Amino acid sequence: MLKRQLLKRLLQIGIVLLGISFLSFLLIYLAPGDPVRAMFAVTGNIPPEEILEDMREQMGLNRPFLVQYVNWLMNCLHGDFGTSYSQGKPVSQMLAVRVLPTLQLAFLSLVMMMVMAIPAGVLSALHQNRFLDYFIRGVTFFGISLPNFWAGLLLIYFVALKLGLLPVVSTGMGLQKMILPAFTLAFAMAGKYARQVRAAILEEMSQDYVYGALARGLSEAVVLWRHIIPNAMLPLLTLLGLSLGSLLGGTAVVEVIFSYPALGSLAINAITSMDYPLIQGYVLWIALIYMIVNLAVDVSYGFLDPRLKKGV
């Protein structure tokens, strides 16, 4: 049964990816501007129109839309996403180079977020309508309201420039260079997740099984750690999957602020230079990673909640 559902979901992913690839190719095809001129504009020397026309012919840009799309799609199926107009490198190679920094930043952000959000949400629920609850809710509200770019600039000013604890920019690899961009991303997410954790804990605390466990003599700590928290964490999986997909897709603003060399900053450069093959490859990457992460979340539900396996 699980295998059949998995195959069905994989088939759906293929169909959705095909639709996304068509729409993204169509939108870029209809976008104003001339990629050949943009390619030469980077060098600062635009050749005569005859040479530009020859380049369009060589790149296949004069062919009908469907011919261009089918050629591009067939190449993609063989792992060839084309060549970057702006840098002259294979798109697949450029994306592959940026994947590892993106993965590192995404997972460090998620770890930081959970370290902040789960204790805050649990404490807020356990001290409902008391000072600690109001304080945590105020901090989380501040975290949600603060734009990422502003939080990043504040961290650069105070932590990097005033205190000198961490580097201003995050070019290159290393944990120290990822702390500030990861914390910037984690802080805003932590506020949202802490509120979700608080609400889920309060809902579980009002369930009959909690009163039954306490009536049987189990301590509050045992009921909290063995029953309430595990049950409250399950609904957060979907939200966590969406956040992971968003982080893996690239968090462009934060990456640009910290000069972090990941997928988001690559996408910004591709858009500003009208690098169509790179934009199309990036869009496919985002779509694919979102669907894979959501598939993994759905599959994990079946293992974490036995009721779903039984169709309860």
Image (cartoon, grey):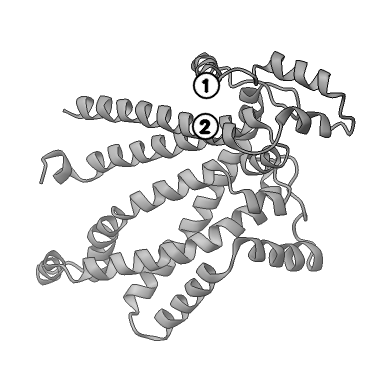
Q: State the residue position of label 2.
A: 26
Sequence-wise, the earlier of marks 2 and 1 is 2
Quick check: 105 left or right of 163?
left
Q: State the residue position of label 1.
A: 69
Q: Say above or below: 70 vs 31.
A: above
Q: Position of residue 160 (x, y in %)?
A: 77, 61
Quick check: 175 left or right of 133?
right
Which SS class for mark 1?
A: helix
Nearest the eye: 59 or 7: 59
Residue at 53 percent across and 16 percent down: it is: 67
- Amino acid identity at mark 2: Leu
Q: Is residue 116 visible?
A: no
Nearest the eye: 53 or 8: 53
Answer few, some or many: residues within 10 Å of disc 1's Cα (few below 14, many 20 plus, some between 14 and 19). Answer: some
Residue at 87 percent across and 24 percent down: it is: 48
Nearest the eye: 278 or 109: 278
